[in-house]
Amino acid sequence: MLLCLKAFLVLQEVMGIPDGVGIGCQPLSAIMEEKLKTSYVSTGTISMRGGLKTRETVEDDEDVALSSSVEEFKNGNVQMMIGHAESWSTNTAASILDSLQEKGKILFNFVDEAHTPLKNHWEAFRPQMKREPSMLRGRAVRGSPTLAMSATLTEEEVGELQNC
């Protein structure tokens, strides 16, 4: 994950978008919580209610919690935004993404546990882990890279993931 954060900082400079943001998808709250402690970039989470949260915002009856206010996310004050796949598909997250996309601020995205869209993985019980990372990639400015991470990919799965 350190590589992800460092790559993001380099991209801000290389792409000439110093106030750009990164967005990512991680399946586990414990991994996301660890990122809130980083000193490299300001990091925030969009998580499922009942899971990881440091400050709740109640916008309506959605099952989502934010580590910072909606406005801090929309304005890009949170440089690296990490969420569960299910959280990215909420109206709150869509509103944040719409705002950032309209401003041309999304310059990097990543997915942890990148093997999830592959055959015989999480599709049965976490289907949004297959769909949401692609949706996030579509929100980024043209030419933005995607970092796909996993500690368990086989050589065959790397090829399958490239085809995805």
Image (cartoon, helix red, strand yellow):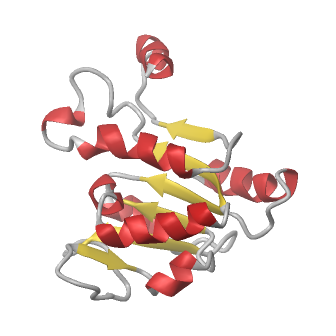
Q: Give the vertical position of 53 relative to 126 (above or below).
A: below
* Closer-to-camera residue (63/55): 63
Residue depicted at 40% across the width and 59% down the height: 31
Quadrant position of the C terminus in the picture: top left
Q: Does residue 35 show up? A: no
Q: Give the vertical position of 94 relative to 57 (above or below).
A: above
* Closer-to-camera residue (50/90): 90
Task: Say whether residue 120 is left or right of residue 69.
Answer: left
Residue 12, how many percent across, how many down? Answer: 78, 59
Residue 148, how many percent across, how many down? Answer: 52, 37
Q: Does residue 25 show up? A: yes
Task: Say whether residue 40 is left or right of residue 38.
Answer: right
Task: Say whether residue 40 is left or right of residue 132.
Answer: right
Residue 14, how many percent across, how many down? Answer: 86, 51
Residue 144, how many percent across, how many down? Answer: 68, 44
* Closer-to-camera residue (45/99): 99
Residue depicted at 60% across the width and 64% down the height: 102
Residue depicted at 52% across the width and 44% down the height: 137
* Closer-to-camera residue (32/162): 162
